[in-house]
Amino acid sequence: MAAVPFDPAQHQASTVCLPPGNWATVLDCLSEHFKAIGREQWLDRIARGRVLDAQGAPISATLPYKQGLRIHYFREVPNEKPIPFQEQILHVDEHLVIADKPHFLPVTPTGEYVEHTLLRRLIHRLDNPNLVPLHRIDRHTAGLVMFSANPQSRSAYQSLFPNRQIDKHYQAIAPALPGLEFPRVHKSRMASGEPFFRMQEVEGQSNSETHAQVLEKNGELWRYGLSPITGKTHQLRVHMAAMGASICNDPFYPRVVENQDDYGKPLKLLAQRLRFNDPLSGEERCFESRLTLDW
């Protein structure tokens, strides 16, 4: 029987193609290329089988360097800060996992977070290394995230998003906008801003679209229903700020605040509902978050 090709994505590994250089070993190259990770850390990872060759086999500390060699490695963050909020698993079947993500928890490993991410937590809880998120929501946003649980059916569910065959509905609490008419459509061209993690609206043909309505009024604050037609980074946060009502407790918009992880002031944005026709069965499916946004 032929060996199954190693898929780094399914094993939650990162991949690097070794750059040009004069190193003697792969260890020398990794130590120089990733300056934030010390040589001793690479030696420790190699000793624990956390650095692999293109076929998925653990490498040795003496493996000779070769330009273009594909190396897979597992990201680790020493003394990773725990996120003191628990996700909820709402649905599990052969193909899909639906989870409610709490505020502040990243969906996938990024920056200073690896184990304290929704993906890694679900892999451990469900004992399924094949889990892959089908879409993302911001770390500061709470609510529904859908995962593929089966590589065989993954592409069918992935196609729902770029083909706009899935309805995503959010709720947000933000200042009242009595001067605007609702429901309304907000379109704009979004591009990377400053600092690098922020987005901004710029001149040009629109590449983002959000449908907004008012669900409830409570004095100076309103509860908005937001349906993103496109899926740009921070789209709902940018669009609400552009309309004149930044979402309550937003640490990025309209300006960056110093304490971005104030657990007492979560961003008032919730991915509340996902609705789509199942690409395998054809049946309509709808999932709703069990989380709520308090005033």
Image (cartoon, rainbow, N blue to C red):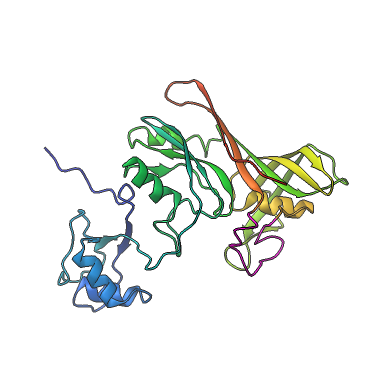
Q: Is residue 228 visible?
A: no
Query: In which quadrant of the rendered view does residue 250 lie?
Result: bottom right
Query: Could you tell me which residue is drawn at 78 percent across and 38 percent down?
Result: 216
Vertical relation: 8 (above or below) 147: below
| Magenta part, dominant SS | loop
Q: Is residue 18 visible?
A: yes
Provide the residue span drawn in magenta. 249-266
Query: Could you tell me which residue is drawn at 37 percent across and 37 percent down?
Result: 149
* Image location of residue 18, percent across then percent down: 28, 67
Locate residue 232 relative to residue 223 in the image: left or right.
Answer: left
Residue toward you, 118 or 81: 81
Query: Could you tell me which residue is drawn at 39 percent across and 30 percent down?
Result: 93
Decide whether residue 259 is among the magenta residues: yes
Vertical relation: 125 (above or below) 30: above
Decide whether residue 280 is among the magenta residues: no
Vertical relation: 249 (above or below) 100: below
Q: How many marks?
A: 0
Locate residue 216 relative to residue 274 in the image: left or right.
Answer: right
Locate residue 253 relative to residue 148 in the image: left or right.
Answer: right
Quadrant position of the N terminus in the picture: top left
* Image location of residue 156, percent across then percent down: 42, 32
Query: Could you tell me which residue is drawn at 21 percent across and 66 percent down?
Result: 46
Q: Which residue is farthest left?
A: 1
Residue toward you, 109 or 195: 109
* Image location of residue 226, percent across then percent down: 68, 41
Residue toward you, 50 or 211: 50
* Image location of residue 22, percent across then percent down: 24, 79
Q: Which residue is farthest right?
A: 179
